[in-house]
Image (spheres, helix red, strand yellow):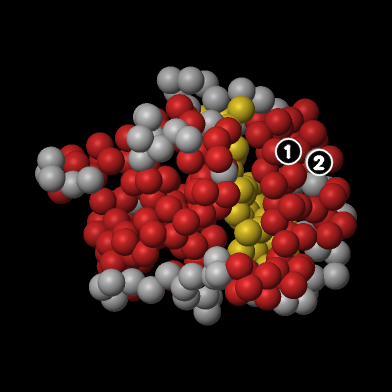
Amino acid sequence: MKFPDQSYNLLVDLDMKHCNLPAGDLNKMEASLSPLGDMVRHFPVSKLHVLISRRDRTNDFVVRTSLILSGDTLVASEHHTQVHAAFEHCIDNLVRELQRYKDRLGNVAEQAKQQEGTHHELLPTLPPDPEAIEAAVREGDYAAFRTAVSGYDTPVSTQVGRWVERYPEVAARLGNGLQISDIVEDVFLSAFEDYEHRPQGVRLGDWLGRYIDTAIKAMATHLDRELENVNMARLARQVATGPGAV
């Protein structure tokens, strides 16, 4: 599904699960695209994939967005009782991430990260199995996906431990209802849901790393909801692989 009037250099695809949106909500969502549309006007490739779902228990809308550019993919996710509000928050986050991306194109952000010592490449402890990953995604098997990318557990966990210090409100919750492993699980869950939209030519470790900041921000704003997602994902893994899965 697409917005009815796309008069900007941004191809938008909408996927909806367990919900249907009235025209009024779609119009509000399309109107909020202007800032992002202006920023990608001169990009040769700019595609926005939007996944919208609804939780039966809370009745909240979950909006996950992936902005696919020629050399990168930017992601954002939000929850809200109003779908257009969740979407607008995602667009605001993407606009900020896109500005950082433009800075990186000029090496501004990258040079600063190298000087601060915060640039860390995600290298797996065990090589991933691309065929197993793709098969798991095709079959919607999260447990199999986690097994196939298990070599990234330790490097992602290490990177989360470094990055979370940038968010004192989240760091303060560690050991008090929140664990590093919860954020790590959220990273892999988002990657699993967005895997089909991963750009070609981007290393898996680099791509996984892009979800770390998004996961921490989600924990900062919607801790209970994100933990519910994480616990459901862990339960699915336990059912599939036995009680020893974590």
Q: Residue 85 in the image: x percent, y percent?
A: 70, 31
Mark 1 Cα-neighbour bin, 10 Å: few <14, some 14–19, many ≥20:
some
Confirm whether residue 229 shows in the render: no
The residue depicted at 61 percent of the width and 67 percent of the height is 116
Residue 213 position within the rendered picture, expressed as x and y whole percent measured from the top left: 55, 52
Of 61 and 151, which appears nearest the observer?
Answer: 151
* N-term mark: 2 or 1: 2
Residue 123 quadrant = bottom left
Q: Position of residue 153 (x, y in %)?
A: 32, 59
Q: Residue at x 77, y 60 (%)?
A: 99
Residue on which disc 1 sits: 88
User: Which residue was labeled with disc 2?
Assistant: 32
Position of 225 with respect to 75 (left or right) is: left
Q: Quadrant of the C terminus?
A: top left
Marks 2 and 1 close (CB-CB < 8 Å): yes
Dot 2: what SS?
A: loop
Q: Which residue is drawn at the image coordinates 53% and 31% (left, top)?
A: 222
The amino acid beneath tag 2 is Ser
Say which element carries label 1.
Answer: helix
Query: CA gap, disc 2 to disc 1?
Result: 6 Å
Res. 49 image quadrant: bottom right
From this view, report whether residue 207 is shown above or below residue 14: below
Q: Foreground: 138 or 96?
A: 96
Q: Visible in this render: residue 83?
A: yes
Q: Residue at x 39, y 59 (%)?
A: 158
Out of 116 and 241, give the one closest to the viewer: 116
Q: Quadrant of residue 51?
A: top right
Q: Is residue 246 left or right of residue 6?
A: left
Q: Local crowd at mark 2 within 10 Å, few (<14), some, or many (≥20)?
A: some
* Residue type of the residue flagged with mark 1: Glu
Residue that protrudes farthest toward the front in the picture: 116
Q: How many labels, in total?
A: 2
